[in-house]
């Protein structure tokens, strides 16, 4: 059970870290300063949440490792993040749609973790939920603004939704390490989020005049450490300093 | 030995590095002060999960108190920080500094809270961006005096 809890905590931490890293790639490159700052701020919230989770994971592991060891010195197959969050940024529409799909799920998950029987996960969720609610408001507004915008923005949003869809199914699945935790009311049963997630996406997409993709072809594996080709490149960039100069600090 | 009351007084001198008019007490991030076995134990809670000022704040608290007694600073996540814990004095100081203090309401999509311009008091203000110069702020502009300003977001 303790190993399961460690893996689950790492899964949450990795997902937030990798999504934050992706958002951080926009820093200084966004089309308008205000949205550059928005993405950096969302990234910062996600990094903060991942830090709390990595600190907990390090304690659970009990090997004297730190949050930094877990973030910077683990390999690709040890990362348990969702496949969705490691997908490339693409254009603004693509990054935004990825964020929106995740925000809808993240809020459902956070609200459920408020009821977790694990005190520490509950506290981290309590801290995170207000931030996540704000992220979802931001991404929902932009999905509507661009979906129901010009023909160009609409086309880009639809293309983003269509190409990202196959990575969304994994969110509402359970990894083997979650099964026992679900029984112990520590982790939420992700399959139960499916209906609410779809309903929320449908609601915002309707307002945005976008079509919810219908394909059933879904990829999974990230939660168990089997990733798309993207993750290795992300880790290479993120970890190069600690790999080249072990123990380096500011 | 120093008392908890005296420590609270001293903490009023420790300010937020990003918003230097606010003390850590005004901000509501100091949750508890205890004196245990000749050691000062200060419990703080972060504003936002990723607030980069938290490490500096922890160091500043230690530096402020270490001349009196050994200090331990511990972080508590629950109950989660809310702007409801910001003192009235803190809100006034923010406004005088040019940052609009938090107000309730207007948190839904395409909504905004009714924020007064900290310069001319006009209610005719517009949100320019939901995110601002720090995690705790959003960017506004007054539609009467046209001055852009920071708004300290209501976080609850």
Image: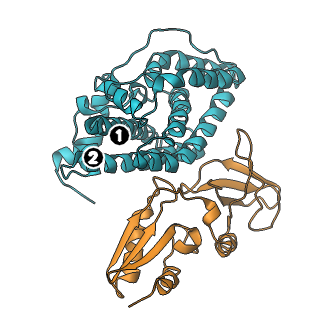
Chain colours: A cyan, B orange
**Which of disc 1 and disc 2 is earlier in sequence?**
1
Give the residue displayed 59% in from the left and 49% down from the top.
Answer: B131
Q: Is residue A244 left or right of residue A123?
A: left
Mark 2 and mark 1: span between their CA atoms? 9 Å
Query: Which label is found at residue A60?
Result: 2
Mark 2 is surrounded, within 10 Å at the Cα level, by few (under 14), some (14 to 19) or many (20 or more) other residues, namely some
Where is residue A76? Give x, y as percent. Answer: 25, 31
Which class describes the residues within 10 Å of circle 1: few (<14), some (14-19), or many (20+)? many
Extreme residue in the front direction: A184
Query: Does residue B30 show up?
Result: yes
Residue B101 relative to residue A190: left or right: right
Q: Which image quarter holds the N terminus of chain A?
A: top left
Q: Chain of mark 2?
A: A
CB atoms at circles 2 and 1 under 8 Å apart?
yes
Q: Provide residue B49's location: percent of width, then percent of height.
A: 47, 53
The spot of residue B52 in percent (x, y) is 44, 59
Q: Residue at x 53, y 56 (%)?
A: B80
Look at the image and tell me in which quarter the C terminus of chain A lies: bottom left
Q: Which residue is mark 1?
A: A9
Q: Which mark is residue A226?
A: none
Most foreground residue, B4 or B16: B4
Residue A4 percent across, percent down from the top left:
29, 34
**Judging from the image, what secondary structure is the residue with disc 2 in?**
helix
Subunit bearing disc 1: A
Residue plotted at (52% across, 24% down): A192
Residue A47 at least partly seen: no
Please tell me in which quadrant of the rendered image residue A103 appears: top right
Apparent side of residue A147 relative to residue A176 in the rendered image (left or right): right
């Amino acid at each position: 059970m303790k190993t399961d809890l460690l893996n689950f905590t790492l899964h949450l931490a990795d997902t937030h870290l990798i999504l934050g890293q992706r958002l951080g790639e926009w820093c200084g490159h966004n089309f308008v300063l205000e949205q550059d700052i928005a993405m950096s701020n969302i990234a910062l919230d996600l990094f903060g949440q991942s830090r709390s989770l990595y600190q907990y994971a390090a304690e659970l592991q009990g090997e004297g490792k730190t949050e930094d060891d877990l973030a910077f010195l683990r390999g690709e197959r040890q990362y348990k993040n969702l496949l969705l969050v490691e997908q490339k940024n693409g254009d603004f529409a693509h990054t935004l749609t990825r964020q929106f799909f995740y925000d809808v799920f993240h809020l459902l998950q956070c609200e459920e973790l408020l009821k977790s029987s694990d005190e520490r996960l509950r506290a981290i969720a309590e801290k995170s939920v207000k931030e996540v609610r704000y992220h979802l408001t931001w991404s929902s507004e932009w999905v509507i603004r661009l979906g129901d915008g010009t023909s160009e923005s609409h086309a880009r949003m639809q293309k983003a939704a269509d190409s990202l869809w196959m990575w969304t199914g994994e969110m509402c699945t359970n990894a083997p390490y979650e099964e026992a935790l679900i029984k112990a009311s520590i982790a939420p049963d992700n399959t139960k989020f499916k209906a609410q997630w779809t309903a929320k996406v449908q609601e915002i997409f309707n307002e945005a005049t976008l079509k919810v993709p219908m394909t059933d072809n879904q990829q999974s594996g990230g939660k168990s450490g089997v990733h798309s080709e993207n993750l290795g490149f992300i880790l290479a960039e993120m970890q190069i300093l600690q790999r080249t100069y072990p123990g380096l600090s500011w | 030995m120093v008392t908890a009351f005296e420590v609270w007084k001293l903490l009023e001198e420790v300010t937020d590095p990003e918003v230097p008019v606010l003390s850590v007490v005004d901000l509501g991030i100091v949750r508890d002060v205890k004196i245990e076995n000749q050691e000062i134990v200060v419990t703080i809670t972060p504003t936002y999960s990723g607030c980069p000022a938290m490490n500096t704040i922890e160091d500043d608290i230690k530096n402020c108190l270490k001349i009196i007694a050994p200090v331990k600073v511990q972080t508590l996540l629950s109950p989660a920080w809310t702007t409801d814990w910001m003192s009235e004095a803190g809100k006034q100081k923010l406004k005088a500094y040019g940052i609009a203090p938090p107000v309730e309401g207007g948190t839904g999509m395409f909504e905004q809270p009714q924020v007064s311009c900290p310069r001319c008091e006009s209610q005719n203000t517009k949100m320019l961006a939901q995110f601002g110069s720090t995690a705790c702020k959003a960017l506004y502009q007054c539609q009467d005096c046209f001055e852009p300003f920071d708004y300290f977001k209501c976080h609850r």
